[in-house]
Image (cartoon, grey):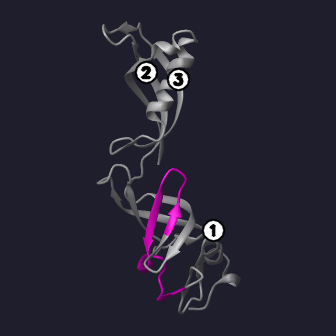
């Protein structure tokens, strides 16, 4: 889920930025420090939206830079267990489907791709044996988060499923609403 979060930090402003507007210089430093930052509590910081407060700066002897206690807002993506996410298939391998959800990627194990026995072809297509439904690179899908790992903070992992009602390729969801389009089981 995407959140707007308020943070407070002491931002180091190098002397080379002393000549430009304070808020512009701080915004540049905050963006460099926080955009793309990954944290177990925050998730992934997508953007720094605005600076809300800047307190008086302090210069530390021997450093020459100024430090400003700054309050600012960020947009962060933090996946939650059982959350339903939309994504686009980026790649398909023999063992699973990789979904890109914008800020993060997740993987659906082949056994969680659909409620059917599936076969994998070399042209990166998964096909259901009975339903004849298929998944290919570029398909838009709805999935549910079943596992979240921030064990490797530089590469967080999401485990996903598409085997429940209301999940899977978006075209399948349209079929389930229109009885004329239903696939014979």
Residue 61: where, in percent of width, then height? 30, 7
Residue 7: where, in percent of width, then height? 40, 27
Label 3: which residue? 27
Mark 3 secondary-structure assignment: helix
Label 2: which residue? 71
Q: What separation in Å lies between label 2 and label 3 (alpha carbons)?
A: 11 Å
Is the residue 147 above or below the residue 53 in the image? below
- Which segment did they paint magenta? 98-121
Mark 2 secondary-structure assignment: strand
Q: Earlier in the sequence, mark 1 or mark 3?
A: 3
Is the residue 167 above or below the residue 118 in the image? above
Q: What separation in Å lies between label 1 and label 2 (alpha carbons)?
A: 40 Å
Label 1: which residue? 138
Residue at 48 percent of width and 59 percent of height = 105
Residue nearest the viewer, comparing 146 with 51: 51
Residue nearest the viewer, comparing 85 with 62: 62
Indicate the quadrant containing the C terminus: top left, top right, bottom left or bottom right: bottom right
Within 10 Å of the Cα at label 1, are there few (<14), some (14-19), or many (20+) other Cα atoms? few
Q: Which mark is residue 163?
A: none
Residue 108: where, in percent of width, then height? 44, 70
Within 10 Å of the Cα at label 3, are there few (<14), some (14-19), or many (20+) other Cα atoms? some
Which mark lies nearer to you, 1 or 2?
1
Q: Residue furthest right?
A: 180
Residue 110: where, in percent of width, then height? 44, 78
């Amino acid at each position: 889920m995407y959140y707007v979060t308020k943070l407070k930090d002491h931002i180091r402003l190098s002397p080379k930025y002393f000549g430009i507007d304070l808020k512009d210089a701080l915004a540049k430093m905050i963006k460099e420090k926080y955009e793309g930052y990954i944290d177990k509590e925050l998730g992934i910081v997508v953007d720094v939206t605005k600076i809300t407060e800047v307190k008086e700066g302090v210069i530390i002897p021997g450093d020459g830079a100024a430090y400003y206690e700054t309050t600012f807002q960020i947009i962060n993506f933090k996946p939650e267990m059982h959350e339903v996410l939309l994504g686009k298939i980026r790649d398909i391998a023999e063992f699973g489907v990789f979904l890109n959800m914008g800020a993060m990627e997740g993987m659906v194990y082949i056994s969680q791709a659909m409620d059917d026995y599936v076969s994998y072809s070399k042209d990166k297509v998964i096909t259901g044996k009975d339903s004849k439904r298929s998944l290919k690179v570029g398909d838009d899908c709805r999935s549910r988060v079943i596992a979240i790992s921030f064990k490797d903070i530089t590469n967080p992992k999401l485990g996903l499923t598409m085997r429940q009602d209301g999940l899977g390729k978006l075209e399948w969801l349209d079929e389930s609403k229109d009885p004329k389009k239903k696939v014979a089981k």
